[in-house]
Amino acid sequence: MFPKAKVAVHTNSKLKHSGIWIWFLACLIGAAGYCFAQDTIYPSYEDPEAPADPVREENIVIPIPIRGGEISPSEAKREGKIQSRGALNFQDDVFLNPGNGFGFALNASQGYISDISDGENINPSPQISSFSGSVFFNEDRRRSSFHMDLGAGSQFYYHTGYDTFIRPNFTANVNYAYQVSKNTSLSVADDFSSYYQDFSPFTSLYSPIQEISNLSNEIVLSRQRIHRNFISATINRQMGRKINLGLTGLYALYKYAEEGLNTTHEFHIEGYLDFELTRWLSLTNRYTAYLNSVNEGEREARIHRLQVAGLDFNIGSYVRFWSGGGVSFSEYQNEHRLAESIDAGIGFTSLNVVMTLNYQRDFTSALGISRLMLTDAMTANVGWRITRWMNTMLESRYSRSKDQAESGILETLESSGQLGFALSSNINMKLNTFYENQKVINYSISGLDIKRVSAYLEFQYVWPSRGRSD
């Protein structure tokens, strides 16, 4: 599928790579020691003579989100709900605080990537330096809230025996929430990114785009630039005390640099009706329609999913369990197929911790290669604000997808993690790691056996300081 060109591999770079990992470890240990010392000497940024907050942390009831950590601004304003700190990094503390009308961040990082896939057309184990900046704007009013952030930067690739090359990257995020009436809310969001996907940024578990269907399957591809754009809109209506209904629409664009991969346009629409039986048990009903089309405008895949009487348990104030089943109907290459749909999981959300474990089985559309799959996927997310100075986030996903037009199977394991330190009220440090392992079994498409490990150390300056935003 992909063109291959041989390159020379320099074995004498192993010592240099070992030095990089030792440097990472030394910075990590130093940062941890510094932060623990700061916790002991200066337990908080606030003025010690300022009056104490009358709301005690242990008295705050944290809502259980549908997906870990995400609570819409309109919902938070209407019901007094707050967002778990476990789903946010230290930059989010500043960028997403409605009290900050304007601010910016500057980032510098040094990374390492080892691509040991079958493809020989990629320079093995390069060192990467990255520099970027971003600005944000917030406007918060009684019935509405607005957030926008824009970012740009460059990645510099180095490898012994090869020329240095530069890859620019761009991001943009806009979201708006409006409280139409006491029981009706509206939200819209647009999330754009364009970057060389081998060094994708790990931000946080928070996302302004409401994930509604999980019917798209973004598989691991060779290192290249990918443009992504997601536009979503949601309207929600609370009918009395027991019934909640709404409608969500999502458009997604994926554009690939590699020849032979299809630019993909996705359209999702989902209607939902939830009925609260008791304070701890609700029935969920959902209908989802999905359309995938490629460059020429041909309709590559249609998927319809119906879930009736799914169970949603709120166990106490912090734990949520959901289980739903239904049926999915697909239309692909003039053939119709029927399959069961399963969505079950458990989540824990407190002021400083968010955890979710989710299993799903459904039809999916493999992006880029435009194939209809029947996918079993297990996803786990953990976010933990360990102290005021330290946080960690982990994401992992395993999926096994069977092509519905042939007997091929695609297995993918992806894991990413972040360990963050607030070195001061304006300076943060993050250590990010990524692991991707994808293999094919009896599949006709070549170039999808990919194994990749990357890590980078990042320093960040943020204004205004967290002392103002916390």
Image: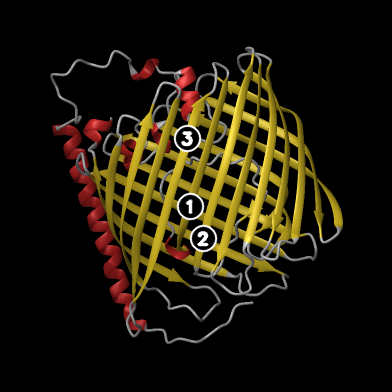
Q: In this view of the protein, which residue sits in the foreground, 71 or 345?
A: 71
Which element is circle 2 on?
strand
Q: Which residue is mark 3?
A: 176
Closer to the N terminus: mark 2 or mark 1? 1
Q: Residues within 10 Å of mark 2 (few under 14, many from 20)?
A: many
Quadrant where the image shows the N terminus:
bottom right
Disc 3 from disc 2: Cα separation = 23 Å
Where 120 sits versus 458, above or below? below
Work out how far the residue at label 1 is from the one at label 3, CA to CA, in angstroms: 15 Å
> Where does residue 342 sit, x and y in percent of width and height?
72, 40
Nearer to me, 239 or 449: 239
Name the front one of labels 3 and 2. 3
Rounded to the nearest whole Å, what is the CA distance between mark 2 and mark 1? Answer: 8 Å
Count of numbered circles in the view: 3
Q: Residue 334's quadrant in the figure?
A: bottom right
**Secondary structure beneath label 1:** strand
Q: Amino acid at mark 2?
A: His
| Quadrant containing the C terminus in the rendered view | top left
Residue 426 lies in quadrant: top left
Give the residue at mark 1: 192
Q: Amino acid at mark 3?
A: Tyr
Q: Amino acid at mark 1?
A: Phe
Out of 450 and 209, give the one closest to the viewer.
Answer: 209
Residue drawn at 86 percent across, 57 percent down: 335
Q: Which residue is mark 2?
A: 227
